[in-house]
Amino acid sequence: MNRFLVSITLFLTMCCFSSTTLGKELIREFKGTESKVTADFEVRAPWIVDWRLTGDYPGQMALNVNLMSAPTGEYEGKIVTTKYVDNGVKLFMEESGTYRFRVDATLVNTWTLRVEQLTPEEASQYKPKEPFQKQKR
C-alpha cells in the first residue's frame, strides 16, 4: 500500500512539474522611466510582449515602443503607441529571431516590457485587446 501511495505521489508531482515547464516562459523583462534601446533577446514563434505603463500625466505623457531586428537595427513593427496609463499584450505568431526594443518615453513613471515564450495552445487563447479610448465629456 505504501509503495502504491509513493508511486501516485511521485506521478502527480512529475505531472505538475512537466505542465509548468511546457507553459509560458519568461525570456526577458525590461523596465525603465525614459527612452532607451534595450538589450537583445532571442525568441521563436509564438511569443508575446506584455507591456505596462504608469504615469501621472494622462494625455500629456507618451510611450512609443518599436520592435527592431537585433543584427541589422531594421524596423520590424510597432508594439505600442499611447499617451495614457495602460497595459496590453502583443502576440507574434510567425516571427522568430533576435530582436531589441526602441523605447521612446516622455513624462512616464515606469514602463515594463515582458517577453514571454508561448506554446501554440496558449497562443490560440489570446484575444486582441481593444485600444484605449479617451472618454468623451
Image (spheres, grey):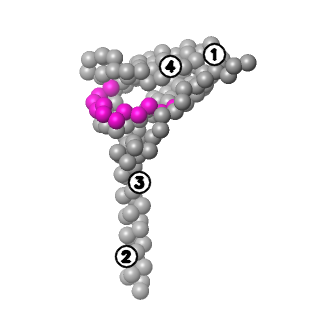
Q: Earlier in the sequence, mark 4 or mark 1?
A: 1
> Horizontally, is 73 left or right of 87 in the view?
left
Asked which quadrant contains residue 30, the reply is top left
> Horizontally, is 80 left or right of 57 in the view?
left
Magenta span: 88-99
Mark 4, residue position: 81
Distance from Cα at disc 3 to Cα at disc 1: 40 Å
Magenta stretch contains residue 94: yes
Residue 26 vertical position relative to residue 55 in the rendered view, above or below: below
Q: Amino acid at mark 4?
A: Thr
Are there few (<14), some (14-19), or many (20+) residues within 10 Å of tag 1? few
Asked which quadrant contains residue 136, the reply is top right
Task: Name the secondary structure under disc 4.
Answer: strand
Q: Residue 47: image x %, image y %?
A: 37, 37
- Residue drawn at the location 42% of the way across and 79% of the way down: 5
Mark number displayed over residue 59:
1
Q: Amino acid at mark 1?
A: Gly
Q: Amino acid at mark 2?
A: Ser
> Horizontally, is 128 left or right of 40 in the view?
right
